[in-house]
Image (cartoon, rainbow, N blue to C red):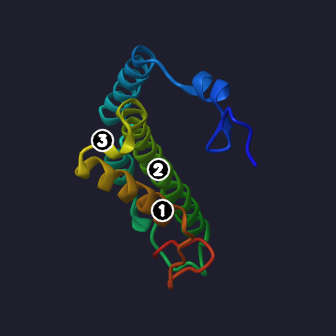
Amino acid sequence: MLPADMVGDVSATRAANLEASNEALTTFMKRVDTVLSDLESSAGNPTRVGAQTINVTSLGEGQESVFPEPHDLYRQYNSVHQQLTSLSKTLHLQIEAIGIAVQGAHRGFDNLEEEQRRRFWEIQTEIKEIRAPKKDADDPKTGARL
């Protein structure tokens, strides 16, 4: 049996300490919006990061068996590029999700617009998909296409 001051496995005193003020949540929400806006206009924007690719022929021509270094460099660059692109996308999505979560904490998740609740769960799915390891048939070790 729970003590009289326990509600949902949390004491009323602790629950009161966890409540965030309207002003604190509004300030935090503005900070999150600013960070997201700054990221979208920076070189760290997922679209900009994803566009910075190279072609294997720009590193040198010839068969890999004769001169393998350019091909190795390309595979490494491509691997790092894919990881940076994933990191940038994940960061962008997580900041967006934090913004929605802050609004939910402020107004209550059930009081958010249906579109915001849907987008929050869509972001969670996108992040899981980005984090899932992907193998490429062309190069199972690095995932690079030659």
Q: Disc 3 or disc 2, which is closer to the eye? A: 3
Q: Residue at x 51, y 49 (%)?
A: 87
111 is higher (above) or lower (below) than 22: below
Residue 121 in picture, x, y percent from top left: 39, 57
User: Is residue 53 in sight in this rendering?
Assistant: no
Query: Which sits earlier in the primary sequence, circle 2 or circle 1?
Result: 2
Q: Residue furthest top?
A: 23
Residue 99: numbered disc: none
Task: Identify which amino acid the numbered label 2 is placed on.
Answer: Thr
Within 10 Å of disc 1 (Cα), the crowding (few <14, some 14-19, many 20+) is some
| Residue 23: quarter of image | top left
Distance in Å between CA atoms under marks 3 and 2:
26 Å
Residue 39 in picture, x, y percent from top left: 37, 33
Distance in Å between CA atoms under marks 2 and 1:
7 Å
| Residue 140: quarter of image | bottom right
Within 10 Å of disc 2 (Cα), the crowding (few <14, some 14-19, many 20+) is many
Query: Which sits earlier in the primary sequence, circle 3 or circle 1?
Result: 3
Residue 111: numbered disc: 3
User: Of residues 18 and 64, which is closer to you in this image?
Assistant: 18
Task: Identify which amino acid the numbered label 3 is placed on.
Answer: Asn
The residue that mark 1 highlights is 130
Distance in Å between CA atoms under marks 3 and 1:
29 Å
| Residue 61: quarter of image | bottom left
Q: Residue at x 45, y 17 (%)?
A: 24
Residue 70 in picture, x, y percent from top left: 55, 65
The residue that mark 2 highlights is 90
Task: Identify which amino acid the numbered label 1 is placed on.
Answer: Ile
Within 10 Å of disc 3 (Cα), the crowding (few <14, some 14-19, many 20+) is few
Query: Which sits earlier in the primary sequence, circle 3 or circle 2?
Result: 2
Q: Disc 3 or disc 1, which is closer to the eye? A: 3
